[in-house]
Amino acid sequence: QVQLVESGGGLVQPGGSLRLSCAVSGSPFNINAMGWYRQAPGKQREVVAAITSDGDTSYENSVKGRFSISRGNAKNTVVLQMNSLKPEDTAVYYCNAGDYDGTRVYSYWGQGTQVTVSS
């Protein structure tokens, strides 16, 4: 069974930084893209940043220049470095990974980690 394990959320003051990590455990077929989503209270879940197996990255407009997504040193890990955090970044952040067995596409989700930006 494939699982995503997230870490690194917490409480930070505006302007501060946090680093989120996500690792895939179990036996996936072939993890390709990985990314981070977030969901604030009363809002829909939105993609924050994503990275392909080739290292191509994409970001939601409001986080460009502040957040950086990268592959971790270990296989099937991803890191989200969040700088210059704002109160509007407060949300539950979810890791997502896409898997492919040659026929079917699978999408896995982490349990979510709370990020709170407040003074």
Image (cartoon, rainbow, N blue to C red):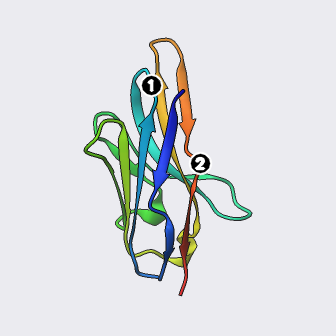
Q: Residue at x 45, y 12 (%)?
A: 102
Discs 1, 2 touching: Cβ within 8 Å = no
Helix or strand or loop: what does disc 2 sit on?
loop
Q: Residues within 10 Å of mark 2 (few under 14, many from 20)?
A: few
Residue indicated by mark 2: 111
* Vertical side of 67 occupied by 101: above or below: above
Q: Residues within 10 Å of mark 1 (few under 14, many from 20)?
A: some
| Relative horizontal placement of residue 14, taking residue 114 as reference (left or right) | left
Q: Residue at x 52, y 36 (%)?
A: 3
Of the pair 26 and 73, the residue shown nearer to us: 26
Q: Residue furthest left?
A: 73
Helix or strand or loop: what does disc 1 sit on?
loop
| Relative horizontal placement of residue 69, taking residue 108 as reference (left or right) | left
* Vertical side of 90 occupied by 94: above or below: above
Q: Residue furthest right?
A: 42
The tag earlier along the polypeptide, 1 or 2, is 1
Instruction: Tell me the quarter of the picture where residue 53 sits.
Output: top left
* Vertical side of 16 occupied by 65: above or below: above
Say which mark, if any, is on residue 28.
Answer: 1
- Kind of residue at disc 2: Gln
* Vertical side of 1 occupied by 24: above or below: below
Residue 109 location (% of width, % of height): 56, 41
| Relative horizontal placement of residue 118, taking residue 77 as reference (left or right) | right
Residue 47 location (% of width, % of height): 53, 50
Q: In what quadrant of the picture does the N terminus appear? A: top right
How far apart are the two marked residues, 1 and 2, measured between alpha carbons? 18 Å
- Kind of residue at disc 1: Pro
Q: Residue at x 70, y 65 (%)?
A: 41
